[in-house]
Image (cartoon, rainbow, N blue to C red):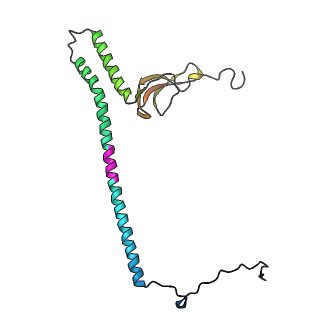
Amino acid sequence: MKRNAMNDKPEQPQPPREPSGPESGALIEPPDEAVVRLEGGLADMKDRYLRLAAEYDNFKRRSAKERTEAWQRAQADLVQRLVDALDDLARFAHVDPAQTDAKTIHDGVDMVERKMWKALEAVGVTRVDQVGVPFDPHVHEAVTTRPADHPAQDHTVGAVLQPGYRMGDALIRPARVVVLQWQGGETRGSGDGK
């Protein structure tokens, strides 16, 4: 192997060169033919692009229509679940108070509420109305605060002024709550060791 005198490294063998030029026997495409071939390829690509764009537009329209129809079916299903309770409520709204005692009206309203909750729970609606749980700004709206009786109650829900509602994981309305805050001094066993 030969050594390069400049950096004392062995020379790498060079690949054999292909002959070039007219004597090489390689065929060179005439420019007019190359232009025709490239224009044909461009026309094919443009046609494919336009077809794909049209298919995508059709897909978007079809998807939007399917989403709208699914939403309408879901709303109709919910209304269908509630109409029986609404019919009962309408009957109780038109009773003659002079001929009906308070207990009958109370029991009727209670029945309507149970029917409505049964329908709402069937579609995944739950109430957010727990007292004594930690305040969570994702599901609670603090209306006011009140002093806590014990440090463990700090930043917990002391009262629910208006319940909140969830449908699955989505919050429909936050619960409006009173938040307890501990305002006392340090307790024994913490802080400076008193």
Overall secondary structure of the magenta section: helix
As rendered, which of 46 and 100 lies closer to the eye?
Answer: 46
Left or right? Give the position of 154 relative to 74.
Answer: right
> Range of the magenta residues?
59-67
Answer above or below: position of 18 versus 105: below
Residue 50 image point, x, y percent:
34, 64
Is residue 64 within the magenta segment?
yes
Please tell me how many numbered marks the rendered image carries. 0
**Residue at horizontal 52%, vertical 90%?**
22
Dividing the picture into quarters, in which one does residue 111 lie?
top left
Residue, far front: 25
Answer above or below: position of 105 versus 68: above
Q: Quadrant of the N terminus?
A: bottom right
Dividing the picture into quarters, in which one does residue 67 lie?
top left
Residue 110 image point, x, y percent:
33, 16
Residue, far bottom: 23
Q: Quadrant of the C terminus?
A: top right
Dividing the picture into quarters, in which one does residue 103 lie?
top left
Residue 29 image point, x, y percent:
45, 83
As rendered, which of 75 and 171 lies closer to the eye?
Answer: 75
**Residue at horizontal 48%, vertical 22%?**
131
As rendered, which of 63 and 38 lies closer to the eye?
Answer: 38
**Residue at horizontal 27%, vertical 24%?**
84
Answer above or below: position of 97 versus 85: above
